[in-house]
Image: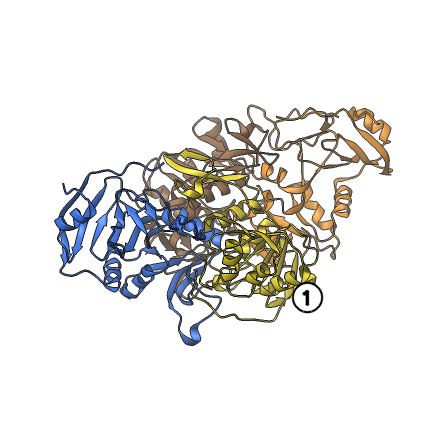
Chain colours: A blue, B orange, C yellow, D brown
Amino acid sequence: MTTTPTARAYAEAPRSADHQLSMEELAAVIARDIPAGAFVNLGIGQPTRIADHLPADSGVVLHTENGMLNMGPKAEGDAVDPDLTNAGKVPVTELPGTAYFHHADSFAMMRGGHLDVCVLGAYQVAFDGDLANWTTGKPDDIPAVGGAMDLAIGAKDVYVMMTLFTRSGEPKLVPRCAYPLTGIGCVSRVYTDHGVFDVGPDGVRIRETYGIGAKELAERLGITLS
Amino acid sequence: MTTTPTARAYAEAPRSADHQLSMEELAAVIARDIPAGAFVNLGIGQPTRIADHLPADSGVVLHTENGMLNMGPKAEGDAVDPDLTNAGKVPVTELPGTAYFHHADSFAMMRGGHLDVCVLGAYQVAFDGDLANWTTGKPDDIPAVGGAMDLAIGAKDVYVMMTLFTRSGEPKLVPRCAYPLTGIGCVSRVYTDHGVFDVGPDGVRIRETYGIGAKELAERLGITLS
Amino acid sequence: MSRAEIVESADAAVAGIEDGATVLVGGFGLAGMPFDLIDALIRQGAKDLTIVSNNAGNGEVGLAALLAAGRVRKVLCSFPRQADSWVFDGLYREGKIELEVVPQGNLAERMRAAGAGIGAFYCPTAVGTPLAEGKEEREIDGRKYLLEYPIKGDYALIGAHVADALGNLVYRKTARNFGPVMATAATTTIVQVGEVVEPGTLDPEAVVTPSIYVDRIVQVAARHYTVQGAR
Amino acid sequence: MSRAEIVESADAAVAGIEDGATVLVGGFGLAGMPFDLIDALIRQGAKDLTIVSNNAGNGEVGLAALLAAGRVRKVLCSFPRQADSWVFDGLYREGKIELEVVPQGNLAERMRAAGAGIGAFYCPTAVGTPLAEGKEEREIDGRKYLLEYPIKGDYALIGAHVADALGNLVYRKTARNFGPVMATAATTTIVQVGEVVEPGTLDPEAVVTPSIYVDRIVQVAARHYTVQGAR
């Protein structure tokens, strides 16, 4: 089913920062890379922060899979409306030019490839773009997938935002995912606190590094620099 | 593909009229048989007349497959609006409680079996309910199907309204259709100027006769009375 | 389905739901959840139900209360596990309830297929994942798809904003979610609304669920639950 | 597709349509037919086109004029033959144009599938008829279905009523017909509207085509053609 992850991997003169990025700084980096006017879905959790870093004039239109385009910021105080939430069920607002639609239309929009970018969290991403972000597969875990598998295959570009290492120091960008897959070969770019990577059929490539050299990063991940 | 039409056919004490019905009278008969509150699609041509014979309090809701429920009568004079037509492209009106929808939603409504009754014209109907109404199959005929095949399989009950015989006297209710089929086993009842028939997997049964005895009618059609 | 019936109470609306029925329940979390109909269903007593819904209940209300009452044999949903889904979690861990996890988009599209007369469809979601197990895979134009079958309900319980007396419905903001799709996919669609108006009041261009999909309507008092932050 | 572009003329709207392109053309008869865009396409000169539309032109205007100009290699439609379809009829009988007849509902659903990422679907229409030839048949739950594939367009030309500056669209009455479905099924969707308004003017509950599906918009003057009685 999944293809063997290619051993070919390379890095060329990556941009860099002199320190590991916080999730907030990383959100700003991703916001910078989202093209003006793009239609974007920001997954539940960390990716939600990216919205705060989009320039007001970016013209980026946010989609939420529970049935809305042109979603505005989180609702506060009196603006909270139980009939208006994002996919994480957090109360949000609408912007001028909002459109509402039902779930089948909303997922048709995603799965038909109309979104430009989707940003998701992940447990693991493989060098070839395989994604694992829906279940740890532990026996006592109650499985729950939500829209994860639809989002994974649904945008022109699927970005992942995550810490590069687990708390115990294991890489989450890996030759092959150990966790149950969400989608195969679906991720094109991985944004982490230690650096940014392109992934896909041609393997992994370091784009930027933060607080670590490309050579050292490649070694920690088992990437062969070409 | 089509099942062999059953030879079993019967008639039991049909109601009758002392004369062949005009298409206008036949429209009134069909209107009488449409249940109050039903959702109904009336095909292009003769079936359109049925609308004029529905009692004002029938609560029948008319569907037109180009995207409308609760269609009103034909538009006259200033009421003509080029953006509001029926499936025959005749200008119509809307009634209070109209809903508009696009073509995929409209045909989903039909094909999902939500309409109670659809009334269609026909070239031929077979005893087992096969329908031929879209093309004569002549070599110089330009094929054109429109919504005929979707309508044929789309309603809980598909009625046909037609003259029983061609101008040259050939029956149009036949053991097996000679014309290319529109749908198999889809018609449940056939309303004609000479009588009304149930058709289907159990064969043909005379329900009513107009200006002809059941025995004579059965003979002309080659129906064996049981 | 002939013309929609306006009934006097939520209890009248859910009358006749049989033991063992498959019931589609609208709502995404709390938005669009038909609380009054679910409460009436608990009073009505039907058991051994299969529930199709995005989630498996929040806190102690709505679906969670139906589950707690022991009426549900099986849940078909995309996301049972939530911060406040302790009722479901407990039943599941005790082996007292069956669970079938369906990707959210498949849940919607499979119900649409049921309503639209589609026999099955090839869908790109879940290819190569554990949820592909047992499903037919086919490559079309170089992409892999799984064959997905319709999900049909005996009943749908949905919450809408306003109905007209014919049964046309409009929804409010993201509370629309699964309502319009479920209305098409059930043999009998039962709707609670905040208001019933005369035909001709709703804009025909803005009707979301045409009357043909609606069987019973009950008007209920507005009720707002706390919005929680779990998916 | 990034944000919709509002262009100054129908000519600018159809710029770049390549020879050999597949173009979805909205309208059911004359209602919703994007006349200005078609006229501009004739001026633009693209040839060898495949046209997907419900009909194959009426009288001498719109699609009929495009056909008469010799730009169309193939028509994929449900109902070419009409009382006033003499342009198509002539070309067809002379063998100068290819025709693929598709049931009207399949035309709509196959475009929906293209827009929704569905690889193929099993549909009950046309089973046992000449239009089933060459199609895969499968029995599901005791009913027979044919396998139908998506119809994708390189371009869609559609007529809508009002757009907002982001590209959200509303339609008018039965002129809605194929527009919303075609908008989802084309790589580039080009829309003519009677009016462009500021974002926030359209009711978010009543938007029929969300802006994500729209690439170019041109505002045109109202133009009414005689309504004919042919299907």
Q: Which percent across, then down, holds residue A150?
A: 41, 48
Near-viewer residue (A212 or C112): A212
Vertical placement of residue D131 versus D22, above or below: above
Image-quadrant location for residue B221: top right
Image-quadrant location for residue B135: top right
Q: Examine the rendering and report whether any part of residue D188 can be seen.
A: no
Q: Is residue C153 left or right of residue D200?
A: right
Vertical placement of residue C156 versus C125, above or below: below
The amino acid beneath tag 1 is Ser
Near-viewer residue (A4 or A14): A4
Q: Residue at x 41, y 47 (%)?
A: A111
Image-quadrant location for residue A162: bottom left
**Count of numbered marks:** 1
Q: Which percent across, then down, holds residue D176?
A: 50, 51
Vertical placement of residue D119 versus D168, above or below: above
Q: Which percent across, then down, holds residue C164?
A: 62, 63
